[in-house]
Image (tube, rainbow, N blue to C red):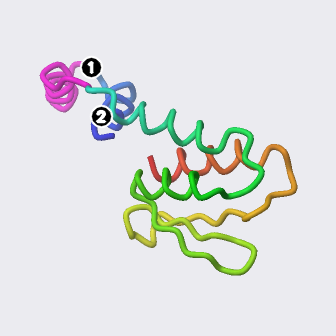
Amino acid sequence: MVLDSLEEVQEKIDPKTRKAHIIKDILSTNERVGELEKRRRKVKEIFKGYKSVSSNMKSELEGMGFNLKEEGKHIKLTYHDDSRYMTTIAKTPSDGRTGNNVASNILREMM
């Protein structure tokens, strides 16, 4: 996540500056292991075709670091028990695009 952020910054600054050189050095000396991309794919996979929250879905989300709290017809997902990274999902969504939308929201705000 840090390397992704540095790449975004690198694209926006003058390449002749010391800041640009430091960022370039950090990026070139730190190997990416692809963990973030794996987690992003997993989130998309979990919510693909989402029609209800199954026990398997719950355990996969918990395995990724989400805390699930049932509240009526919804489930509150909190990422690594940090209330800044929270979203709500329906136990039984009515829209066929809900899974894609939830996955997009999680990826944009939490990963």
Amino acid type, callout 1: Pro
What's the magenta region? 15-32
Task: Find residue 65 and report its image quarter.
Answer: bottom left
| 3 or 75: nearer the viewer | 75
Q: Tell which tag, 2 or 1, sits nearer the viewer.
A: 2
Mark 2 vs 1, N-terminal side: 2
Q: At which x and y percent is residue 38?
A: 42, 32
- Residue for badge 2: 6
Q: Is 26 colored magenta in this rendering?
A: yes
Q: Is residue 24 left or right of residue 56?
A: left
- 40 or 21: nearer the viewer: 40
**For mark 1, does the 10 Å Cα neighbourhood hold few (<14), some (14 to 19), or many (20 or more) residues?**
few
Instruction: List the residue tagged with mark 1.
Output: 15
Say which quarter of the image contains residue 48. Answer: top right
> Residue drawn at (73%, 65%), measured in percent from left and top?
91
Q: Amino acid at mark 2?
A: Leu
